[in-house]
Amino acid sequence: MTSEAQKKCPHAEGARSIPPSFANDPYPFFEELRAEGSVHQIRLPDGTVSWWITGYDDIEAALSDWETFSSQVHNAVQDENIQNSQALIRKDVMLKHTMINRDPPDHSRMRKLVVRAFSASRIDSLRPRIQQLADELLDDLEKRPSVDLVEDYAFPLPVGVICELLGVPHEDIPYYGALVTKLTGAQSPQEGKDAIEALKGFIIAKLADKRANPGDDVFTAMVQAADEGMLSEPELPAMGLQLLTAGHETSIYMISGGMLRLLENPEQLAKLRENPDLVAPAIDELLRFDPPPVPGIFRHVTRDVTVDGTTIPKGALVILNLAAGNRDSGRFSCPEKLDVTREDNPHMAFGGGVHYCLGARLARLEGEVAFATLLRRFPNLEPAVPLEQVCHRPLNFLQRLESLPVKLH
C-alpha cells in the first residue's frame, strides 16, 4: 500500500487475518469487526488484501452505488498467481463477460435478455415440477436408514430445476455438478483453472447443441439473441455459465445449511412442524441468519471513497459482508436469534441494486417446496451424527456443508 493510502486508513499498519474457526462459524468474527467499526482491512487466505464492509447501512449504500463499487473486479485483480477461487473466477478472460462481472449499460443489456425467463408467472408455474422432483428424491431416500442431506437432496433438487429451465439434459447433471463442486471448492490455482476450462467446454458444447437443435428454454433464447447481435460471442458462454452455476449453488446451502440451523434450534424447527404456513417466511429468516455468500460480494472501488470514517483507496478490492450486515443490531431486533416468525426482515442475502439476484423468486420457491415436503413426509427427521461434527468446507466465496447426515424416520 502506498504511503498516501496509509495516511487515509487507520488499519494500514497491518491487515487482519481471518481466524481458523471462520469457515465453520464466521459470525463471532463479524461481530468482533462490527464492534470496532464498519470497515476493516482483511488479508484473505491466499495473501490478497481486501477491505470488508460489515455494517448494514453501509453495505446497502454500496450495493446501490455501482459507479463507485464496481462489479468489474477483474480490474482490481493484478496477481496472476492467485489462489482464492473467487478472484480466479473474476480474473478469467471469458468469465469477466458475465453479468455478475459487468456494470451498466452492459449489465442492463444482458439482464434484459433473460429477465422474462425468471418472471413471477414463469417461476410460479414451476411449482408442480419442483414438487414432483422433491417427491421423487424423497421416494428414493425413504428406504434408507440415513442419508446425506447435501448430496442426496439439497444438491439434486435445485440442479434439476435450473437444468430444466435452461435446457440442459438431466443425464449431464452428474458431470456438470462434479465440475462446479471442484470449482467452488478449489484449493489451488491449478485446480480452479482446470475446473473453469472444463466448465467452459461443457457450456460451449450445450450452446452449440441448442443452435443446431433449438428448444423452448433459456439457452435457446440466448443463442438466438447472440445470432441477432444482442450478445457477443464471448458473452454468450459466460452468461450461460453464470446462469447455470448461480442458479443452484446458493440453493444447495439454503436447503442444507438451513436445515442445519433448524436442527441446532429445535424450538424453531418445532414451530415449522406445527405450522406449515410459516415455511415461506422461515426461508427468508434462514437466508438472513446464515446466507450462502460468505465472506460476501466482491467489488472494487473506482475512486477514493470514505465509509464510516475510513477512506478506501481507489482500485481496492472490497468485500460487502452480507452475512455480517444481516446480523447488524442497528437494523434487526435480536439478530443473533433465529426466529422463523420474524416479520420485519429486509435481509440482503440476494444482494441489492442493479445486481439484485435474478433468481430470488426461484430460490424462495425451491426452499419452500424443499422444506415443506421434507418436514411433512419425515416429521421425525433427526441428525445422524452430533451436530458439532458437521463441517463446512474450507473458506471460499460460497458456503457449502461437507455433508449433513440425517435419519429420516
Image (cartoon, grey):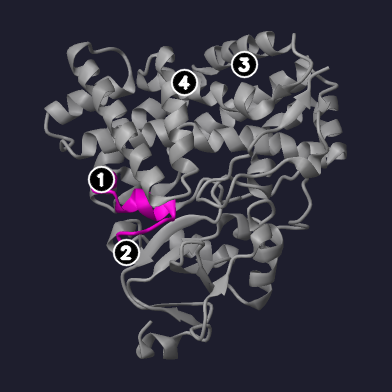
| Relative image position of residue 244 (x, y in whole percent) | 39, 30
- Per the image, label 2 sits on a secondary structure element best described as loop
Q: Secondary structure at mark 3?
A: helix
Near mark 3 (Cα within 10 A), the count class, few <14, some 14-19 or many ≥20, is: many
Q: Amino acid at mark 3?
A: Ala
Which residue is disc 1 drawn over? 97
* Of labels 3 and 4, the one closer to you: 4
- Nearer the camera: disc 3 or disc 2: 2
Q: Are marks 4 and 2 in contact (CB under 8 Å)?
A: no
First along the sequence among labels 4 and 2: 2
Residue pointed to by mark 3: 134
Specify the segment rendered in magenta. Answer: 76-95
State which quadrant residue 343 falls in. Answer: top right
- Residue designated by label 2: 79
Look at the numbered discs 3 and 1 and tell me whether their residues touch, using CB distance below 8 Å.
no
Instruction: Give the CA separation, mark 3 to mark 1.
Output: 34 Å
Q: Which amino acid is tagged 4?
A: Pro
Distance from Cα at disc 3 to Cα at disc 4 = 17 Å
Image coordinates of residue 213 in percent, x first then y, are 22, 11
| Residue 194 painted magenta | no
Residue found at x 63% / y 29%: 150
In the figure, 8 relative to 83: above or below?
below
